[in-house]
Amino acid sequence: MTENITSCKRVMVIPGQFITDFKSILIETLCCPESQLTPNANLTYMGMDSLDIFDVIMKLEHKFDVQMPDSAFPTYNDITIEDLLTKFANKLMECGRLSRRSNIMTMYKKSITGKVAATINPLQKNTLPKELVDEYNATAAKLHDLEKKMNQYAK
């Protein structure tokens, strides 16, 4: 991260791919299921220290080929996933590489809540008690995490 560099490469970023890449970096670094990557999740409360958070920022800068100013994250204590997502999306928009019409936060929230819940029959989802749907989503997220761990051993 540096304060003086303002150059941006002019390669456009597709909003859906931005969200996918963003989540992949967080999942890899945090070793957590996607369902825990809620916008208001605080990285410190998720077990990351300031060096881990700095590492995530550096990985995001490298992936999206942008450099955030030091002032973007003056402290690493209270950074949420929404903070990271918004600041990187805004930087890409500022560089003209991401459409200003993209509602990144709405797309991100749908990507988190829609994946697991979408596996329930839509007709059932409207008739099942919310607690049961939440329990199903939590179980599916745990299964996803377990499958990921098992795949690491298969490599």
Image (cartoon, grey):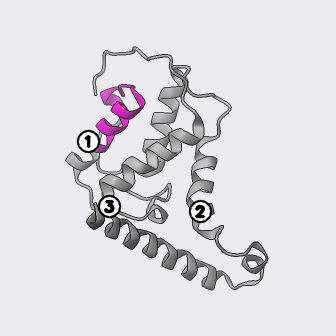
Q: Is residue 79 visible?
A: no
Q: Is residue 152 magenta?
A: no
Q: What residue do we see at 29% from left, 65% from top?
A: 154
Q: What crowding class fits label 2: few (fewer than 14 Cα within 10 Å), some (14-19), or many (20 or more)?
A: some
**Displayed quadrant of residue 27:** bottom left
- Which residue bears the numbered disc 1? 54
Disc 1 residue type (three-letter): Phe
Query: What is the span of residues highlighted in magenta in the rendered image?
Result: 56-71
Instruction: Tell me: residue 44, above or below residue 124.
Output: above
Q: What residue do we see at 34% from left, 29% from top?
A: 71
Q: What residue do we see at 39% from left, 15% from top?
A: 6
Q: What crowding class fits label 1: few (fewer than 14 Cα within 10 Å), some (14-19), or many (20 or more)?
A: some
> Mark 1, mark 3: which one is toward the viewer?
3
**Displayed quadrant of residue 42:** bottom left
Q: Earlier in the sequence, mark 3 or mark 2?
A: 3
Q: Residue 115, labelled with which disc?
A: 2
